[in-house]
Amino acid sequence: MKIQLLITLIALIQLLIACQPVPSNGPAPESSDDNYQQLLAGQFGDYQQANANRPLRFPQDHGAHPDFRMEWWYVTANLADQQGNWYGVQWTLFRSGLDGPKSLGDKRQVYMAHAALSWPGGHHAMQKYARAGTGQAGVTNPPFNAWLDHWQLRSANHESWLPLAMTAADEAFSFDLTLDSDKPLVLQGEQGFSVKNTQGSGSYYYSHPYLQVSGQLNIDGESIAVTGQAWLDREWSSQFLLPSQQGWDWLALHLDDGDKIMVYQLRGQQLDSADTVKWLSWFDAKGNRRLLTRDFELRPLATAEVANRDVPQRWLVHYGDKLAIEAAAKQANQWMDLDYPYWEGPVDISGSHSGIGYMEMTGYPLQQID
Amino acid sequence: MTGWPNSIASRLVVSHALAGHYRRHPLQALFLFTGIVIATVLLVATQLINAQAQASYSKGTQLFEQNPIGYLIGAQGQRQFPMASYVALRRQGFDQLMPVLHHNFQTAQHGVIAVMAIDWLSLQAAPLPSSQLEQQTLSQLTLEDFLLPPYRLMMSSTRMKQLAVAADQSIELANPSETLPALIAAPDNSGIGHQALMDLQALQDISNRQGMLSSVWVFAMSDQRLQALQQQLPPDLVFRPATEPLSQAALAESLHLNLAAMGLLSFVVGVFLAFNAIQFSYTDRQPLLRRLRLSGASQRQLYQALSIELIVFVILGSAVGYWLGAWLATLLLPGLGQTLAQLYGIYISYPNKVIADLPLLPLLMTIIAALLAAIVPMRQVVRQPLLNRYRQQTAQHQASIRDRQLLVIATTCLLLALAISYWASNLWHGLACLALVLLGGALALPAALRMCLQLAQRLVPSNKPLLQWLIADSRWLLGPAAISLMAMTLALVANSGLNTMIGSFRAATLDWLEQRLAAPVYLNLADGQRQLGDWLSQHAPTIEIAERHTIQHSQQRHIEIASLPPMAPFRNSIHLIDQVTNAQQLFAQGQGIYISERHHRLDGADIGQTVWLCDSAPEVTVLGIYHDYGNPRSQWLLDESLLRQCWPQHIGQSTALLTSDGNDFDWPKLITAMSDSGLIKPEQIIDQQQIKKIAMAVFDQTFTVTEALNGLTLLVAGIGIFCATSAIHHHRVRQQAQLAAMGVSQRQRLIMILSQWSLLALLSMSIVWPFGTLLAWVLASLVTPLAFGWSFSTELVWQHYPILALLALVCVVIATLWPSWRLHRVSIASLLKEVDE
Amino acid sequence: MLELETISHWFESSGATEPGQRVLNNISLTLHQGESLALMGNSGSGKSTLLQIAAGLERPQMGQVKLTGELLYQLADKRLSALRREKIGFVFQQFNLLPGLTVVDNILFQSRLSKRAVDQQWLNHLMAELSIEELKHRLPEQLSGGQQQRVAIARAIAHKPCIVFADEPTGNLNDSLSHSVMALLIHLVQEANSSLLMVTHSAAMADYADSVLKLQQSQLIAAATA
């Protein structure tokens, strides 16, 4: 483990249980290093609480909301090359507010970026950090530009938000993609306010699931032209999780008929406890909501051992007679082995509908050594 | 005589009998033990701190175990540049970079605190703290603590101990009501030593240097990437590869040599003591050994028993010596680190735990030295004649002979030293000369004292019986006490020599500083000279600005190139030791350079040679040589015009103000006007006095470690005298009893005993004074020039000498106080019923 | 002139306080000016202890000692030292002489200490009687045992003390030497008009004294003289 990890880790643990001493009150920190969900739980210091009374406006809300503690710009893409090989790409910029007064401005904001490339039999994850205010990282809008060092997600021209240019690179891996769409973005939850727990707190959340992608990947020196679909998630809040919520599972599915489904589940200590919250969000091919429900079945069908954890690989999503699908990971080894590790990778959909998508799972504990 | 079975049992019996001596005279055992300990302690301590420094050098500069391969620094010599340049590079994809800012804070009571600040988030993978304790300490921290006000200052715990501060404390700055952030101890692998560590934005905030960087560390990247980086550099930055570990070691070589020499000195003193103790214990056991031989023990058995006994002492003494040495090293390391930082700009890392790496050399040296020291006395005592009649006489007579022999050896040493001083060409010769002078002085001491006492005896009138006895007994005392007095002499001569040398050096440096500080006011401007120039031409047209540039030679890294402002006061401030004809004129025309004395002495450069300066000045003549005290690097001095020829864009590092006509000027008024106008801040102004103070403070700093060790050797000598006095206690009891029987009161006897030692101490001055002066001369005229390239004349200060005598007196009186007290209380009754051994 | 009054002594470590267990029990003794007295007894009888007490070297557990009217054990060290300088002379069994000083300096040591003018005649007489004139400038370590004792005697009497204490003065010498040294001692003591209190284990030596007392079972008894 890295000292940086430890410092930032402890820091962020602190900031959730704001101003309390190191996690003796919170859930016992496991010997695992992904107390990542604790990043998002807890008190919110000198930040605003998300609530249902704030309508989302665009293009303003594409930019950053420093009054809220955490925020991200999250893109996942299911791609294929001319030979039909599949590829997965992830680009994320996180903004995290430290526990300090508002007067500090940019000084209390820290940016973290994750990027990943997946291909049959391989997976490469990258990360970066920077502080806000020096120009090294930031988000401006309009025109929209989110960057950390040379990783960027920005509007390609000044007139409109789309298309977006998305790039990330390290010594041997990189991607340079363009994301465009003729469909609108969609608001999650109730008009963009997504409830996350029984106490009523939640986040502002919108997505653009209808993005079409084209561009270049560079995998270990080899350049590959790809096309495909992408899903952009935008979320910001000051309190995502309760300390009692262990982690979450998230699915972003592109159905073959053009519909889009988003499933997420926040897991409590026990799967059947009151703290477990799940939502299913179904949009049609034109951007209209078809369904928003908590009343569906979500069950892991198979797990695999990944990075010493038991991580589900196949999920059943069942809603009455409308939907009965299995989302299966294309490959098990999609572990993001970063300072905040989690599982994220492309999935295949089969059952009542078929398609492809992306899945993210966090908070699965390290196996105890027997 | 029945033969003894050569079994372990008989050997044990012999050993047991011999060891029984120490039960009755435990102080003698302590004496020997102490000698061994002393021999080992400083030797181990200095070896350990030198080794720690060397380890640091070979690891190279690092932070959290990451070594930069080079640095991005200001291309024109600017000490800082805006962060935007760095951000631009990062946005081009160069992420093996870490921005760094250096700042020195002037504190109220803790001197200067050097702080290095980094962007925590740009640290490349750094390992976890290595211990549970560190983990706990760190887990009480948060990222907020470092990144957000009121911030935290990370310091190595060794440095904190040196400053006598604790975690969570805030050090006060010289500016009242300002403090540094609260302290936190650095983890073991941080690699920070003398410098403290902070977050970059935090330091920018508290030092009011927002958006500025001192340098950017470049970490390992492929050659292609590095090339690409260098091509992408903005014009205000340049890439400088990391210093070769060797060059740091070379720079600080003299300092480490000094430390090693101190350790050796202490080793020699310790061996002296051990030798003394060995001699005592053997001499005292002469009757016992005789009896053993008479009972049938063979000489071989006696040798074996004595050797084993010696080895046991050596191992026990060395063990304690090592332990104490390690402890001492932990204590001394921050002092060394500070000296290295201030003198050479070298930062070594401090380990948090006691230095664990143990050098074997001291142990070997001690064993060999002890065995060598014991051979002659052992032979003497094992092979002694079995009849005892003239023992008393023999001992005194032998002592006389011994002292004469020592005098012969001393003379040889001095002659050798003389010879070496003529032909000395490198530092080792100088040090050898030094050692010979020291040794010569010490070995000549007993004979000198004997002669003085003989003289004194003739001068004492016969109606002063106590005085008669005092001197006669002092002559007897010389026998057993000579060696510990020699050790004390060694320490005092070294002390005297060093102090005189340091005094002379200090005087020379101060003198030289006075010469060189040609301007009344100096400004610490990062840039903004142009604004200053404009303002001055408006408000104070008679004031001129002089700039000083310093550049590192691009090919010969160890050479510093400095410029001389083209004004009369500055030109006149350079006094040349040696020069070609018309040197000043040629220099002013930019037709040549001056070189520093160090460059001449140590690098072999000389006037008349030509050197390569830069592409537009490939052949420049060396016109003269000047003194450059205190500079650990060789230096070339150029007229500013010549500098501009080679480096037209270079920005000066320091600015001075002076009047163009050399008349008096109301400087305070001008300074107030300048700071009122917001042109400069008060803390940017440095006056001559301040500079002198700072320079002399650094000077004094150089010798703190030496002085500490000096004090220690004197302490060591005092211990030796104490041991010697205690060991001969029972020899002196009888005479004291006789004196008491004849009616000499207790008070009189105590005064006499103390006076004896005082007399010997004062008579030692007959050696200490001349040899101390000689040593100072060797140090000033031989060793320092060879080591540092600085030469200066030895300045003798008369106050020094009586102070030395006082020091010797105090040392001796304190050391002999308790043994003398014991002695003066002796009872006459002990004279009765004494049995001859 | 020397008076011992009801001296009783025991050693603390032995813890014995019963009269029967003491080293010395209720001993009284008077020595007049010019008298000589020999103390005899077996080894361990306490004769040396009695000498020590009489000479002011060991404080008795009970009783007192007066020398020329002064109570020895009431005196401070300064006064006691002065007394020793002027009025007492010691001759020990060995280790009488200061090694670094010549014979003549040794002899005159105590006189010079008490700042008396040197009686050159007396000195010459002493050295002649003791046959040590040629040894004047020798050092003690260059003398034989007998020579050392003779010098010791000279030293003890040179300042004409009131009393001379001698502890086995001939203990280290052979028979013929012993007799000659002893005879000289008695003779010179008488010449100086000093008293002599000596301890000896030899009856032959004891006979030289005016009177002989024996210490037996912590009591003084008159000894049978030859």
Image (cartoon, rainbow, N blue to C red):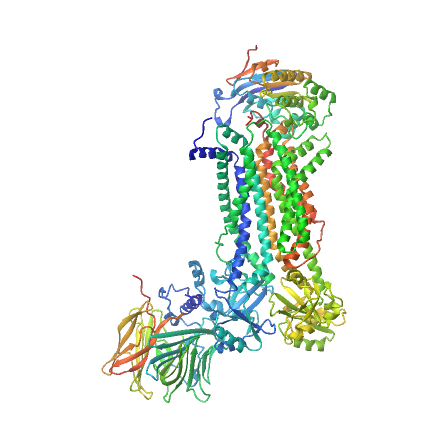
**Residue B244 position by quadrant:** bottom right
Image coordinates of residue A147 in percent, x first then y, are 45, 79
Image coordinates of residue A361 in percent, x first then y, are 33, 73
Query: Against B820, is A282 above or below?
Result: below
Nearest the viewer among B650 and B580 is B580
Residue found at the far top of this picture: C226
Q: Can residue B735 be seen?
A: no
Query: Against B756, is B423 above or below?
Result: below
Nearest the viewer among A83 and B477 is A83
Q: Quadrant of the C terminus of chain B?
A: top right
Number of marks drawn: 0
Nearest the viewer among B396 and B462 is B396
Q: Can residue A129 be seen?
A: yes
Residue visible at 68% across and 65% down? B595
Image coordinates of residue A250 in percent, x first then y, are 33, 76
Nearest the viewer among B152 and B565 is B565
Q: Left of A95 or right of it: where is C155?
A: right
Query: Against B623, is A226 above or below?
Result: below
**Residue B138 position by quadrant:** bottom left
**Residue B233 position by quadrant:** bottom right
Image coordinates of residue B562 in percent, x first then y, are 66, 68
